[in-house]
Image (tube, rainbow, N blue to C red):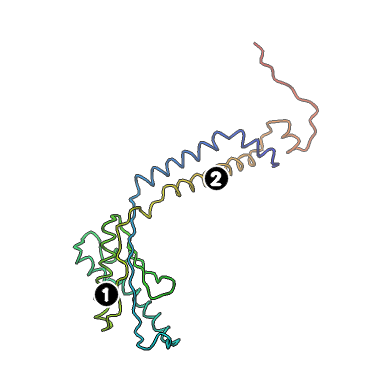
Amino acid sequence: MEIKQFLIIIRKKLVFIVLIPIVVSVITALVSTSLISPIYEASSTLYIISQNTASEYDVTYNELLKNQQLVNDYRELIKSKHIAKTVLEELRITDISPNELSKKITVNSKNDTRVLEIKVRDTYPVRSMKLSNKICEVFVKESVKLTKIANVSIVDAAEVPKTPVKPKPVLYTSLSFLISLLATIGIFYLLEILNETIKTSEDIGTYLELNVLGTIPTFDIK
């Protein structure tokens, strides 16, 4: 199919090509704003103090590996069921199980340092802040019991998030418009390719490879 014929298809189906993506975008916007519950994320940070007692200039490679391993261990401990259960009990939250809370927690090492960022997602912004802060408090206490060393301190406490991280209506609407637009064009293009009906004199030359000797015009006689 030539570009000219493709443009003719676009022109004939222009109303549908424009209308369908708009309808899909409106539906997506309504669903993302009214049916999907907003998710908020609060974050706090912990700093793991090095257990090395030597001078900072005398840190060896093995000690760096040991510190990195300690960070990895703490990352997993923060998401443990024991920490989650203790946090829920102290905050008196009963509608979330320890397993569900563990899935809401994300722990990342910032730029491969000993600073751990604890993010908690929840449908309530204030509760996400309380959970993040309480996790830090509980872990600081529990880490002393586990390691017998007070080597974890809270750097930044979580604040109440002002805007949700999910859903993202603008992003979802834009993607749905673009995808539905491409899909609509593709469907009409495919239907036109599969349609072998001879409709115009140009189709005779295209599909039958025959020369048109003449055409019979239509008249509107009243």
Distance from label 1 to label 2 (Cα)? 53 Å
Residue furthest to the top in view is: 222
Q: Is residue 28 above or below residue 98?
A: above
> Eyeballing the image, is 104 above or below 29?
below
**Residue in front for this viewpoint, 120 or 10:** 120
The residue tagged with tag 1: helix, strand or loop? helix
Density class for disc 2 (Cα within 10 Å; few <14, some 14-19, many ≥20) is some
Tag nearer the camera, 1 or 2: 1
Q: Residue 167's spot in the image, x, y percent?
A: 39, 51
- The first of marks 1 and 2 along the sequence is 1
**Residue 216, relative to residue 176: is it above or below?**
above
Q: Residue at x 76, y 36 (%)?
A: 205
Q: Secondary structure at mark 2?
A: helix
Location of the C terminus by quadrant is top right
For the residue pair 162 and 189, the one nearer the viewer reads as 162
Dot 1 crowding, Cα within 10 Å, few <14, some 14–19, many 20+: some
Depth check, front residue: 74 or 185: 74
x 23%, y 69%: residue: 85
Q: Amino acid at mark 2?
A: Ala
Image point (69%, 41%), residue name: 3
* Residue 193 point in image, percent of width and height: 64, 41
Q: Amino acid at mark 1?
A: Val
Does residue 88 appear left or right of residue 47 in this picture? left
- Residue designated by label 2: 183
Residue 16 versus residue 60: which sits nearer the camera? 60
Instruction: Find out whether the residues at labels 1 and 2 contact each other: C-beta distance under 8 Å.
Output: no
- 50 lies left or right of 25: left
Question: What quarter of the picture does the N terminus occupy?
Answer: top right
Label total for image = 2
**Where does residue 141 sit, x and y in percent of width and height?**
24, 75
Q: Which residue is mark 1?
A: 140
Numbered circle sitting on residue 126: none
